[in-house]
């Protein structure tokens, strides 16, 4: 466990030294210590997923904002879904767990490539909008449904982010978990 924590700490420091990360931290609505704590929570959840027997949990992405964890992704069995939620709740520092988890659909008309394309198009629209701190909005796409995560400064940023996501062709629905600071 100590080796994992050391690796995560080193990886986090390398991440924070990256110019992009420094910029992101400077415009983030959270204090640096909170950002760090959230990154540790997210990394610890991912480490728990990697160690767990239900390896398909890796189709679920955790994200933490002020200790509030969001799980977004797909699951193959109810056990995998429940296990992902359970592991997240057991993680130190987690205040609450909210999830947007969909059962995997065999032969779905929306695959990984479609999700990546949708996510990139939503990100591009957010970046192009000078009234949104786009680095504060994390975009996830699952089965062509968009999930918006993060902490923003104004209700207008939430409304504009949702509108941009809805405007992308191929998006089936938009779920916003954006919160105001």
Image: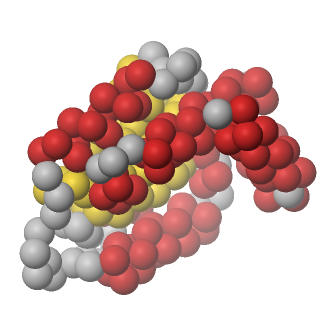
Mark count: 0
User: How is this picture coloured?
Assistant: secondary structure
Which residue does the image show at 11% across and 81% down from the upper left?
107
Quadrant for the C terminus, please: top right
Q: Position of residue 27 (x, y in %)?
A: 75, 42
Q: Nearer the viewer, residue 148 or 96?
A: 96
Quarter of image, res 104: bottom left
Q: Position of residue 30 (x, y in %)?
A: 68, 28
Q: Nearer the viewer, residue 28 or 68?
A: 68
Quarter of image, res 108: bottom left
Which residue does the image show at 64% across and 52% down from the upper left?
135
Residue 122 appearing in the image = yes
Is 4 left or right of 143, judged from the image as shown?
right
Q: Position of residue 26 (x, y in %)?
A: 81, 41
Residue 149 appearing in the image = no
Is 23 left or right of 76, judged from the image as shown?
right
Which residue does the image show at 23% across and 46% down from the upper left?
80
Vertical side of 39 occupied by 165: above or below: below
Is 142 left or right of 140, judged from the image as shown?
left
Quadrant for the N terminus, please: top right
Q: Position of residue 92 (x, y in %)?
A: 54, 19
Which residue does the image show at 55% across and 18% down from the upper left?
93
Is 101 left or right of 115, judged from the image as shown?
left
């Amino acid at each position: 466990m100590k080796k994992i924590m050391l690796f995560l700490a080193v990886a986090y420091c390398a991440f924070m030294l990256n110019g992009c990360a420094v910029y992101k931290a400077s415009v983030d609505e959270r204090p640096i210590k909170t950002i760090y704590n959230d990154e540790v929570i997210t990394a610890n959840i991912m480490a728990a997923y990697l160690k767990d027997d239900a390896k398909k949990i890796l189709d679920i992405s955790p994200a933490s904002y002020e200790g509030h964890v969001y799980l977004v992704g797909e699951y193959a069995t109810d056990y995998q879904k429940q296990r992902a939620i359970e592991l997240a709740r057991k993680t130190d520092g987690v205040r609450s767990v909210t999830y947007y988890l969909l059962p995997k659909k065999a032969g779905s008309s929306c695959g990984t490539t479609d999700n990546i394309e949708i996510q990139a198009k939503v990100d591009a629209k957010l970046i192009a909008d000078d009234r949104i701190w786009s680095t504060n909005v994390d975009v996830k796409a699952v089965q062509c449904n968009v999930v918006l995560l993060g902490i923003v400064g104004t209700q207008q940023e939430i409304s504009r982010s949702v509108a941009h996501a809805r405007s992308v062709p191929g998006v089936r629905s938009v779920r916003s978990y954006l919160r105001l600071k």
